[in-house]
Amino acid sequence: MNSFFIVVLLLSSLSAWADKGVAVVKRLRGEVSVKEQGKVSKLKEDDWLRSGVTVITGDKSFVRITFTDKSQMNIGPNSEMKIEQFGTGDAGVLDLVKGKIRSQVSKDYLGQKDKDKSKLFIKTPNAVMGIRGTDFLISTNGINSSAVLFEGEVVFNKVENAALREISTSALESMVDRGVRIFPGEFSVVEANRPIPTVPSLMNVQQIETLEKNQDFSQERAPSDQGNAKANKSVVPGGLSGTTVASSSTVLDKELKQKGIEGVGSKEKSDITSARGFKEGEKVKPTNGSFLHVDSGTVIAPPKDAVYDANTNTFVADGKSGTVGGDGNYVPPKNVTITDSGKILASVQGQIVQVNDSSMIMGDATLSDMLKTISTTSDVTSIAKVENGTLVISPTTTTTLTTTTFQEAPTLCSTCAIQPSSATTKPSTSNVQLNTGVGDP
Amino acid sequence: MRAIFFIIFLNVIAPLSVGAQSKNSEFNQGLKRARDFFKEGKYRATQESLNALEVSLKTQGTNKNLIGLVAYWSALTANRQQDYQQSLKYFEQALSVDYRPLDIYYEYGQALYAADKLVEARGAFRQSVKRGYKRAVSLYYIGFISQTLKDYKRAVTFYRAIQKLPEEEQEDTTQAAEMQIGDIFLEQAEKHPDVFKAVEVYVIPQYKKALQFNPDSSLAKDIRLKILELQQKYELLLFRMRNGRPTNIPPYFLKISQDITYDDNPVFAALETTNSSAKQGSLVSKTETFGRYSFYYKDIFSISPELRANFSRHANREKEIIRNDNWVLAPSIRTSYEHTLKKKPASFLLDYDYVYTQRDTQGSGTLVFNSRVQTLSVGERIVGLVGNGETTFRLRFRSFDSFSQSANSKAQGLNVEHVQPSKSGKVWIFNFGYDRSRVNDKLFNANTMFLRSDVIFKQWQFLSITPQLGLGMTLTDPVNNASRGMETLLNPSMRLSRPFAKRYRMSFHADYMNNKSKDTKNFAFQKTFYGVEIEYLF
């Protein structure tokens, strides 16, 4: 009789939870509102959210919500996230329309039987992520989406918007299964004009360390006072590669072993090859150690003379390519701006020129190369101007700069505006011969 | 008594020992924590752990070895974050307690280099070389720093020292080192008065040498680009015309030469109509300069102005001989239009030659106007007409004006030249010419046929000598002077040429001429002349 009473009590309490909603607001900062059946109302701490509602955050705002399974979602500034489905016994589905979410998914949630199945899906306008891990960051600007993983494992794939709206969780599962698997320390980007996500790459170590700490989006964007912002110049002398000058941790290991402590170990050479990044057909792998501009999904590869860190298997950019802000986001170098839509704008001789078209993913042409080139070219087209202190971008976004620097650079970024288009105008080097002798005419 | 010791042990020594063990274990835990963070690439967290260890070490006392380890590790961590100001502080701390792991000078050198403390960095890399850590890269750093400090001699020495290391130790530095030597050469060449030649002779060959180390490396691409840029900048690039014919490289040619010849029978033939043999020998000095520059319009037309000037003087000052002293000024313009004929390269040629001569015609020791010759040639050069050689047909229109009006003449002629390279490396040159010369004094009208064959042999490698043999025959038909009959001039010749120094060439040459004529008194002659010529080619 007593047990029956307890069961009834439990069921009624669960039913009361379900009535309240699927998630509760634990913390918020700034302007946070909820949209439910067309009505928008302000959110406050301890408010409950039902399936089907959309949470909207304003500038410099943040909200932490905890789902009934104890999973925690931190929604960053200028974001919009819809809880499509949660707590129905099936995998949950969240729709990130714009902005970013930092999530720490409950291990209870992950304790489901089938470990190869996603426990939660997060959709963006062009991507879907199946959550099988515990700590990640997903971001979208409505055009590009990016995912960064700190712990556990996620799968990430591109999905066309129209196809995504009305599909079941089993279809979502099948979709993410065909995507890329991201491991801790890695990131992947889904671009509007690339058919598949980038092959996951290790992120710049300072950026991932800073991002990991900034769980509640509380830190300011201002450049971090740590690390590469202080770099004077590249440690790689001209002519050598970052891998040649790199030293492994073997000496440190030896020193630690003398103290009875196991060393850190070194990465194999095969890792270095992959660390450089590649492009094989549709597959693009950014260089390990690239920065990610989280707001836009723009990838900034380390410069050619970046030093290789054998310990982390990444190339480390110096201050010339930008640095990491206090919030963990990428901060471009002086006179360069990255808009939220992914345009890299540089101020050159009083004009503002666009360096890329949408994003720049790996390649011989790194940001520092491009900046060097556009600073020496006179053939620039102004595509943006500052009016009353505001950057106004012209509707014409395709700016092609013909330069000599890129004549032999392989085209790795189909979306980059600067292309080695004039390569064919030069005589082939096979025709090059030198008159080594001296002779009478 | 035993009991007392036992009590002392329990109360004093054991707690100290346990305390020390506990602190030691705590310290090791701290090291392990730092190791785990370092392994994950969490350098800030590593640094924080190491800072905590540093503080605990300060309170514990002075274990130099541990202080050194923590400082060294902190320095490595700061280096990984490219925070070189911080890493320098830690390296100096480690070195101050004499903690010197194998790689410390290398890592310290990198930090100094990045912080632009170049002289100190060079010293640190020297230490790294001495300790045998990454010797090739350390030598490269020393070379590179020396190059940056404009200490080129030392830079080249250290770059070249890399190649003395065992091959497996050279890593990927040799090609880069050779390229840097090329950069140093370029720096020097650009200060050279003849930058064009210096780039061609020193810089580009050095870059090519660098290329050979690994033609497929990513650096090789940069080196090729450097070569191409230099060739374009200094006009050393062998462009090809639209039909594939190569252009002259460099576009200019300039030489001066000095020839000393012994002529056993100088022949005076100032008017081309008559000749007079001196019948005694003389040394002849001939000083000459020749220059040409080729301009190319797109890949279709070329125009090459030329200028030749020479002065000849005989050592034997006999009147009959010094009449041959002369100086010549001969500007020309050569043009070509490149096209194809039967899918092979062909050129339409239009040339103009002007030769002005002054001569001591009276044997008075004074050079006076002798003649002015103008020649207009129209021709076609064709490849593949015979074998894989090149054949040139020319029609010539020649006007000869001299100090004696009666000797002035007009001539029309045809010339065919064929250059045939052989598989064995020889080059054959065949020449056929026919001229119809009409002189104001019709007695001297003549029709002349000319045949000549030369062969240039492949260079004799052991002596670097290029031999050349030739045989020419000229048949002259003095149409209005039966007393001369058909004259035959035979001219075998030989030449041995050898380059020496960088820009010089020396040749030994010998000729024999025998002109047979029915008028043995006035027209027949034979002579031998041989000499040495030294050329300086710019």
Image (cartoon, grey):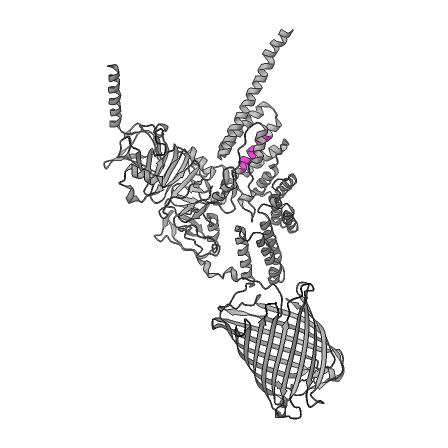
Residue at 54%, 78% (x, y): give it: B393
In the image, what residue occupies the spot 23% across and 36% down? A37
**Residue B460 rendering spot, x and y as whole percentages:** 67, 66
Above or below for B142 versus A249: below
Quadrant location of the C terminus of chain B in the rendered image: bottom right
User: Percent from the top left, x then y, of residue B29?
Assistant: 52, 25
Left or right position of A112 against B162: left
Figure check: B86 above or below B224 = above
Name the side, left or right, on which B233 lies relative to A39: right
The magenta stretch spans residue B75: yes
Q: Which residues are magenta?
A: B68-79
Does residue B413 appear to the left or right of B492 in the view shown? left
In this view, the residue in front, A135 or A98, is A135
Q: Position of residue A196 (x, y in %)?
A: 37, 45
Q: Quick check: can you spot residue B190?
A: no
**Horizontal and vertical percent for residue B344?**
49, 71
